[in-house]
Amino acid sequence: MLAPVARPEPARSRNTGCIHCGLPVAFGRNSSFCCAGCEAVYGLLEANQLGHYYELKKRYADPEKCLPSLENTESYSYLDDPEVRMSYADSSGKEMNFYLEGVHCVACVWITERIPTLLSGVKSVHLDLSKSRASVEITEGGSFADVALEFERLGYRPHPEERKQGELRDKREKKFELFRIAVAAAGAGNIMLLSIATYSGAGPEFSSSFRWINAFLFLPVLTFSAAPFFYSAYSSLRRRVISIDVPIAFGIGVGSIASFVSLISGGAQTYFDSLASLIFLLLASRYFLRTVQNRAVEATHLFKFLTPSRANRRLEDGTVEECKTETLRPGEIVVVRPGEVIPVDGEIIAGSSDVSRSWLTGESRSEEVRPGHAVSAGSLNETRLITVRVERVGAQTRLGDILKQTQVAARGRSKSLYIADQMARYFVPFTFFFIAVGVLIGLQYGVEDAVLRGLAVAIVACPCAFALAIPLAMSRTIGKLAQHGTLVRGPEVIERLSLVDTVFFDKTGTLTYGDLRVLEWTSVRKGLERVLLGLEINSIHPVARAIRKKFSSPDFIPAEISELREVLGRGVEGEFEGKRYTLTSMKGSGSDTEVELREDGKTVGMLVLGDEVRPGAKATVGELKRLGFRVGLLSGDRSSAVYSLSDRLGISRENVRGECTPEDKVSFLKKYPRALMVGDGVNDAIALASTWASIAVNGGLEASMQAAGVYTTSRTPLEVIRTVRAARETMKVVRRNLAFTILYNVVVIGVALSGDLSPLFAAVAMPVSATVVFLISLIGTGPLRRALSEVRE
Amino acid sequence: MKIIFLLVPIALLLGGSFLAAFLIFSARGEYEDLETPAHRILLEDDE
């Protein structure tokens, strides 16, 4: 036998990984950490006697789920804005809930709940792992933004959860739901017990009193547990629509009345057992579906995330005052400091800086701006103070316009396609038709027979697939996907995903990391890294950030540079050990930036910076093509950069477009009626909202839910494949359930029409059919189980 | 077999008390978070 060919193992063993997050440490990096951020957190925790975290982590954490420390990927300052705080915090303004990405084990519980010892102003943090939710309570003067940044630093990306009006009522209603299920379960169980005694031949002296006991047990089930069905059927009839609750309420209502009438008149036609178990199963399947659904936020709220609610207005006499953004009027002057988000659309009248417009264009490089240039609300001012004359504010800005369009597009799509409600529309006429047939057949034998046959059909016809099996199958898939970090808004999204034939990716931030990173570094001798760090020690330019991220470690102490100064639009220069160093940006090839380090005019080092492609991007494209999808790439970045990436990933150029504005993306996607767009939750919001289906990979969680319906926290695009495959397979399970339900109804309605329907038959047929669809949904299919289980390559 | 008419109410009373217990504890939030306490038990030593 041949010896197996040795393959190089990926460097991923635990002892070589980063101490903080377990990620592999880049080759050549002389450190136990993957990045400077992780190292800083480690130092911080050790200094505060919180090193126990790493012991817990070693024992209990799943290294696949741990994330590295995140460095200022987002600004959370809006959380401390008094107006925004009102919609996130509770009424006292002291408590806020965060959805945390990546929390999964006891180490996460331990460290997040110890944030009060790290940060002053925090009273308590409580983590609920089942919901990935941290409840944070602060003291007077504490800052939610600081807590959010602390979560980020520890490697748990936080998403503040908005408090909806009426949330308290929802919570009470949810608790009530559990009560209803409990009452229905207790009722159904006890009724079944006594019924079985009757069916198996208990004498008439028992059976009559047992029927009365059953009726007594059934009353709370009917009036308390089944109330939501009647209420919802009534309200949907008032709106002149037929929802799935109409046939359910009709069946339960008719069955109950017939049973009570029969009971009082001394007959044996009581169906309390079948009805109670049906009510229990329906309530349970709904409860599961509701617990896994995810909320979306209105796009109008998005404007608050993306622009600051306070601005700095410069008055006629030159003094600067803080004011609310809405109070700004065209023609007024605002001052925007470095690191702040520009609150309005306007023109620069003084100062020059670098501005990142990535939300609007998807362009990965920031843009240099000078007096006379136009800037848009929502852009980030990166380097220097600028003064801007206001042209448009609020909803009139380009950002406001984009958000409005997103809202319109998302609303157009939310018209439900949900298969359960659609089937209900057919099921109702179908049932009534057979009731009529039953009555007509019965009329030959007299009026009483006609009524009984009609009732029999109404009671036994069961929309169990739509009412029970579909919610179950959907909630199982949505719940499992959530365990992998992919959050789905609801079942209608799964249906849409299952019909997709084309997948379009956004480039920046989706297939790539979306920030500038050092890709290559060549130098004539060692030690020049210290000079690089020294030169960029204070700059907040993106190039400087990338350099610090790459080289910061105990081995490289930044050189102490004298006469350090920035050369506008070119780079930095300074002196060290008698030599003059300059760091200058060159025009790079494609999307890359080249930076040259010169020593007394002689080139001694060269850096290539660019946006790094995410691992798994190529495998994802290959696998999607193998599965028969058309794959495309849409980006706002320059065409040369976009084509160079698409060629590398194997995406054919006819499906690739560069230099797209958000509107271009929308009109391009219109040509593909069954397209799936995978993009950033913020800068692709309109494209995501206006395609057939979409997955957001970045941006705020609740905002993405509105635009896309699916939000994934996964770092690899491979998750897209899992989601699409799981959706397809789930719909196969759904169709299997539909087929079974049709078969069931044909058989039992046939029996009911023949006039031989006994309570025993109903008591067996209804729970058995419900159990069958329950099992079909729970077991699913092999491909579905494989799609939902771990498939990371 | 008359004993049935004593046993059935007793059974129902038992069942009812379990139901009541469930309702009381779920109202107290005992079933809100079914996952974290299982992990939290690993943290005996400190606090």
Image (spheres, coloured by chain):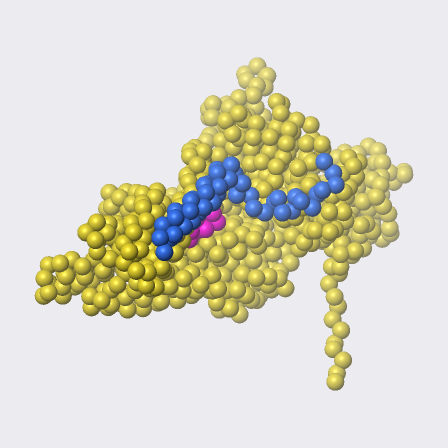
Q: Nearer the viewer, residue A566 or A156?
A: A156
Answer left or right for A220 relative to A792. left
Query: Is A325 left, or right, of A538 in this rendering?
Result: left
**Direction from residue A286 to residue A59 in the image, left or right:** right
Chain A palette colour: yellow
Residue A365 in picture, x, y percent from top left: 62, 46
Residue drawn at point x = 41 percent, y = 50 percent:
B7
Residue A204, x across and y down, in percent? 27, 58
Q: Nearer the viewer, residue B10 or A155?
A: B10
Q: Which residues are magenta?
A: A284-293
Residue furthest out toward the top? A317
A378 vs A425: above or below = above
Residue A292 colored in magenta in the image? yes
Residue A471 horizontal/vertical position (percent): 41, 55
Work out whether residue A110 can be spotted: yes
Whether the magenta-drawn stretch holds residue A598 is answered as no
Q: Residue at x 57, y 19 (%)?
A: A321
Asked whether residue A337 appears in the rendered view, the answer is no
Query: Where the N terminus of chain A falls, by quadrant?
Result: bottom right
Residue A736 to residue A519: above or below: below
Residue drawn at (77%, 35%) of the image: A48
Q: Please, is residue A209 above or below residue A324 in the view?
A: below
Which of the pair A549/A443 is nearer the observer?
A: A443
Looking at the rendering, in which quadrant would you find the C terminus of chain A? bottom right
* Chain identifier matching the blue colour in the rendered picture: B
Prevalent SS, magenta region = helix
Q: Residue A699, percent across and down?
A: 55, 44
